Image (spheres, rainbow, N blue to C red):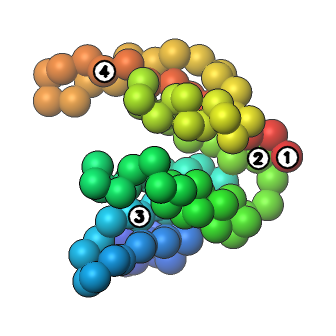
Amino acid sequence: MKANLEKKRTYEKISLFIAMSLVGFGDIDKTGYLDRLFVHADYQRKGIATAICNQLEQAVQGNITTDASITAKPFFEKRDYKIVKEQQVERQGIFLTNYMMIKER
């Protein structure tokens, strides 16, 4: 439990609510690993992911890394992230493709 609490303290978290509904969130750890970035489908393409990502990136110094899904890859490429490598990750017996990406600063 203590390790879990300590881990949570190393994250910068941002959540966006509209009319008391969660429409987007993201988090980044102190090493610059952007772990999650999500926007509800009804609110996509409205600049919400960009706004959240801007705030997360400002919260840390140095390079930023992420493991981006196929659908998120173009978003990160537009933000100057570069592909380090393509990966195959297993989730409940299903293999998914994602991309280790880095934004060098």
Alpha carbons under labels 2 and 1: distance apart: 5 Å
Decide which of tag 2 and tag 1 comes sooner along the chain: 2
Do the residues bearing badges 4 and 2 touch, measured as CB atoms within 8 Å? no
Most extreme residue toward the left, as rendered?
92
Alpha carbons under labels 4 and 2: distance apart: 25 Å
Q: Which mark is residue 86?
A: none
Is the residue marked by circle 4 packed among few (<14), some (14-19), or many (20+) residues within 10 Å? few
Determine which residue is flagged by label 2. Answer: 63
Do the residues bearing badges 2 and 1 touch, measured as CB atoms within 8 Å? yes
Q: Nearer the observer, disc 4 or disc 3?
A: 3
Q: Nearer the viewer, residue 52 or 8?
A: 52
Q: Nearer the viewer, residue 41 or 67?
A: 41
SS class, disc 3: strand
SS class, disc 1: loop
Q: Amino acid at mark 2?
A: Asn
Most extreme residue toward the bottom, as rendered?
20
Examine the rendering and report whether any part of residue 1 can be seen.
Answer: no
Q: Which mark is residue 25?
A: 3
Q: Amino acid at mark 3?
A: Phe
Determine which residue is flagged by label 4. Answer: 96
> Relative to residue 68, is residue 94 drawn left or right?
left
Question: Residue at image x 66%, y 60%?
Answer: 54
